[in-house]
Structure formats: C-alpha cells, structure tokens
Amino acid sequence: MNTHKAFYIIAFTIVISFFSVMQSRAQYNLIKLGYAKMNNKDWGEVLIGKSLTGNEALVDLDNPSFVSGISLGMEWNNQDISPKASFGGIWKNILVTSLNVNYFPKNESSKFAFTPEVGLSLSKVLNVTYGYQFRGKSNQESDLNNNPHRFSISFVMPFF
C-alpha cells in the first residue's frame, strides 16, 4: 500500500470516528488503544467511540451493571491497514464482549471479517480478550498464515 492511500484511509477513519463521538448529555466518549495477535501477525489498534449506556464516565467506573459502547477506528501492522467498527459491552466490571467488523482492502478473496470476542476486564479500563475471526468466502484452508484466532489486550480511557 502506498503512503498516499494509507494517509487517506487514516484521515477518513479519524474524521468518521470524530463524527461518531459528538457530545451528548447522556453519553461520554472513549478511546481504545490495543495490541492484538491475529493471522500470525502483530496488530495495533486505535478506536474512538461513545458509550451507549450510562451517563458519566466516573460513575460508570464504579457501576457494577452493564455498560455498552460503539466505536470506529483502525487496526494496522507493517503490511496492512484495516478500518474497524466495534460494538462492545462489559458486565459486572469483569466480563467483556465485543462484535467487530473489519475491512481488509488488500485481501482479494474476502475483504470483510466478523470477529466476536470475549474476555476479562479490570475495572472497565484494561481488557484481555480472545476472538475468532470469521471471513466470507476465502482461501483460508490453503493459506498457512491465516490463523482465525485473535488474542488482544486493550486500554480504554474515557474523555470529555
């Protein structure tokens, strides 16, 4: 991927992400920074999102019930950049789940991937998850580098 295409994808993702987190009285914004091991490659991720439940970040950190959110961003490694949309939730400050959709522009056989994840959360800030990546029609069986298992660690910070 040339530098111009990468720049445009990054700029587009950031602009769309900021539109998705416009201020609202009943919600707060969040940023997620993470690292994942997927397809036998190391991936970085940054997402910007909005809570869908709860009304204040500091109150939600102490709230033992369910908190959910939606975010947009991207994942990258030294060969690929992938825009990503994610919907996630945390139950009882311990169990974290998410449903993710990625777009892989370089993959000819299957550009979209759906990855459900489940894992543990430490006070809704530090998350460790396992996911399994489902792709549409692909050459998954013949590609030895394609590993559908995803292990990730992420740090989620609220901001206003």
Image (tube, rainbow, N blue to C red):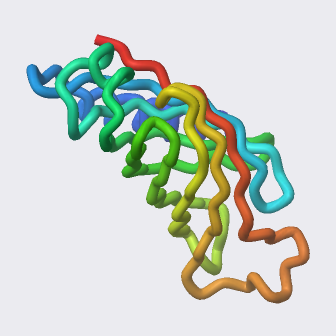
Q: Choose between 106 and 56: the one closer to the eye.
A: 56
Q: Is residue 86 left or right of residue 139?
A: left
| The quarter of the displayed image where residue 62 is located | top left
Which residue occupies 42% across, 50% down?
86
Q: How many circles with numbers are drawn on the protein?
A: 0
Going 30% across and 19% down the picture, which residue do you hit?
57
Residue 108 seen from this side? yes
x then y, percent, for residue 91? 40, 46
Q: Is residue 1 visible?
A: no
Q: Quadrant of residue 3?
A: top right
The outermost residue toward the left is 25
Relative image position of residue 40 (x, y in whole percent): 85, 58
* Residue at image point 31% right, 28% down: 63
In the picture shown, does residue 126 fall above or below 138?
above
Name the spot of residue 60 as percent of width and height, x first. Answer: 31, 25
Point 37% across, 40% down: residue: 71
Classify residue 20 as left or right of residue 132.
left
Q: Residue furthest right?
A: 144
- Which quarter of the figure is the C terminus placed in? top left
